[in-house]
Image: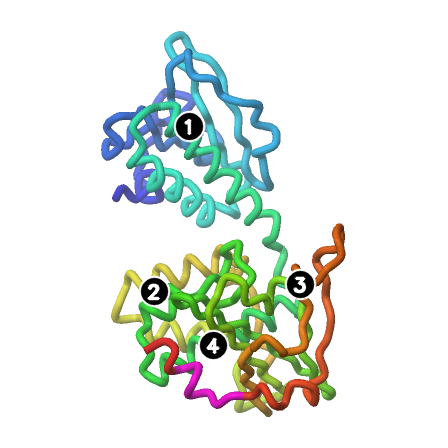
Amino acid sequence: MVNIKSIWETQKPTGDFIMKTRLENILHLNCYAGTNNITGQYLYIMSVAKSIIIPELKNYRFRGVEIFSFETDSSLELNIYLIDNDLKDIFALFVQNIIEDIVTTTSENEALTTTLNVIFKWKKLFDKISFSGMPLEYQKGLIGELFFINSLIDNNVSISKLLGAWMGPEQDDKDFRFGNIGIEIKLTSSKHPSLKITNEGQLDTQNVNELYLILYVVENVKENGFSLNSLISQIRDKLYSDLDKLKFFDERLLLLGYLDDDHYNTMYSIKQIHNYRISRDFPRIIKSQLPLGIYNTSYSIELSAVEKFRVESDIIINSFN
């Protein structure tokens, strides 16, 4: 598969306004990696026949990226233009996703439809990301997921299975899905911990055979603890010998809005770990119970009310084996 970022980085200035390199691995389409010769900004171009109808693109535009089409003497061009150079790494992933998806298409119409679907998916993703830094509660959520990954690696769970099960930035209401098993992770530093559920989908078992909920209760410490940055460093060290897995992990972090330049060094230590199996009589709110028109419900559950649903960590670990 072509590496779009390496093409951009090796393009040499020419007398043209836009430097273009045709993507030779997509033989049935005219697709190009481009660089603005004046500003140095990256773009992706797909050229199609004039008979192809490109829809109104204003609903597909999103932060840091401009998407437009225009007519040349012989064709129509769809241009996806990076206008914020700070986003060049995530823009490369975005364009790479388009390229990977259109390789198997058989016509320009199909390739255009596929491209617009990828754009729309990434628009929703970009709308969720805060590029000015992650809010504290978002950091805690990511810390919980990474602590789970790190712990299971230490318990000799397959790294491939773990990374494949991690939903991360995907549009999913479970943090991890392994086959028909779902796992939801919570982390709190409250002195009076409870289970804070953010929507009616999190504890819904409609699309899974088994669902587990893990609550990490932590406290702030000044030393001998872990931070978001230190957890990432630990996991990277464990993935160092497998560059493909390391690349996948780093891409997921990038899609979640984590940048290596950010400083997330608040330290925590684990006080308690609560593991629960979500069965039919577990106290929860699910979609089928809500009155028509009500959605995105958030609520809290007292830990004393779910004590009988606790399970041992080994049960969850073994679900990955």
Magenta stretch? 311-317
Residues under labels 1 and 4: Cα distance? 40 Å
Q: Main secondary structure of the magenta part?
A: helix
**Residue under circle 2?**
246
Q: Residue at x 35, y 75 (%)?
A: 237
- Per the rendering, the mark at residue 112 is 1
**How far separated are the C-alphas under marks 1 and 2?**
31 Å
Marked residue nearer the N-terminal end (3 or 1):
1
Residue visible at 59% across and 66% down? 204
Amino acid found under the numbered disc labelled 1: Leu
In-front residue for pair 311/164: 311
Identify the secondary structure beneath mark 4.
Answer: helix
Q: Earlier in the sequence, mark 2 or mark 3?
A: 3
Crowd band around label 4 with a 10 angstrom C-alpha radius: few (<14), some (14–19), many (20+): some
For badge 2, the amino acid type reads Leu
Return the residue at label 3: 199
Q: Position of residue 198 (x, y in %)?
A: 67, 66
Q: Position of residue 113 (x, y in %)?
A: 44, 30
Q: Residue 231 has which mark?
A: 4
